[in-house]
Amino acid sequence: MLHADIAQFVREGYIDHPLVAGNRRGTNSINDGMANRIYEYKLRMLEIAKAEGNMFSWIMLHQPGYRVNAFLEVAEQMPKQQLYMVMGEMWTDPSLPGVSPCAFCEWFRNEPERLMFMNRIEATEYQNLPLRSVAYRACSEENAIGVSWTRSLAKAKAMKILLGGSQILTAVIDRDSVFAFINRRNQDELVLFPENARQINAEVYEDVSCNRRQKKE
């Protein structure tokens, strides 16, 4: 029998609990006993993480869709340094949805706080950014305006394939427009202030080497 705490999160045969998720029907389904064991295990791990002050682990024990709410639940209990480290991870982790770039920029408007948002290597790179950087953005025509750019053309091309984007934009980014530099997943990312992202004079990148191959064919 499914644990009462989990049962109230079942919708049309699917468990969508903050700690447990899975389909109770069909292939790769999760049975009640397995769901209960996962739930009980995570409850124990939550207690351990909180006792050790490891709030990042505490947050990550939650299912992806609940991690932002989990963060908000414990944010006030975290030391400032740990708070900023966790928020930096939230920016780069694709399993942590719902974090507004505008909210991040407001929380970290002052440069000293932004340097805490970045790790040590990123902060050093940020402080040594040139006055202008050539950057790229993989996107559709509908979301051409955005805060996330990369200095790596190869990364932009890979992201275009991953996201199914229709184009790659390129622009020259002023250092003063950059909110943060993020590279913990080797993305070479320039995060712009939202107000500056709207003012970027971007052009569609044309792959000259690709055009040459097409002409030869």
Image: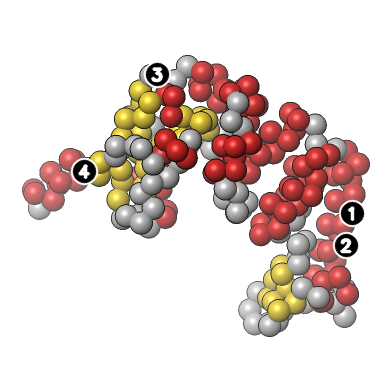
Residue 201 higher or lower than 213, as above or below: above
> x, y (%) of residue 174?
38, 26
SS at mark 4 in the image? loop
- Camera-nearest label, 4 or 3: 3
Mark 3 sits on what residue? Answer: 130
Could you tell me which residue is drawn at 81 percent across and 75 percent down? Answer: 8
Give me the residue at 30% from left, 43% from top: 169
Considering the image in quadrants, where does the N terminus appear?
Answer: bottom right
User: In this rendering, which labeled residue sits more in front, label 2 or label 4?
Assistant: 4
Determine whether, in the image, residue 75 is placed left or right of residue 47: left
Question: Which circle's residue, 1 or 3, is located before the other in the chain?
Answer: 1
Label 2 near label 1: C-beta < 8 Å? yes
- In the picture of the structure, the residue carrying the numbered disc 1 is 44
User: Which residue does the numbered mark 4 point to in the structure image?
Assistant: 206
Q: CA distance from mark 1 to mark 2?
A: 6 Å
Local crowd size for mark 3, using a 10 Å CA cut-off: few (<14), some (14–19), many (≥20): few
As measured in the structure, the alpha-carbon distance from the residue carrying label 2 to the one carrying label 4 is 54 Å
**Tag 1: Cα neighbours inside 10 Å, few (<14), some, or many (≥20)?**
few
Disc nearer the start of the sequence (3/2): 2
Whole-number angstrom distance, CA of label 1 to CA of label 3: 48 Å
Q: Is residue 145 left or right of residue 17?
A: left
Comparing labels 3 and 2, the label whose residue is closer to the camera: 3
Mark 3 falls on what kind of element? loop
Q: Nearer the viewer, mark 1 or mark 3?
A: 3
Residue underneath mark 2: 40
Q: Gap between marks 3 and 2, in whole Å?
A: 51 Å
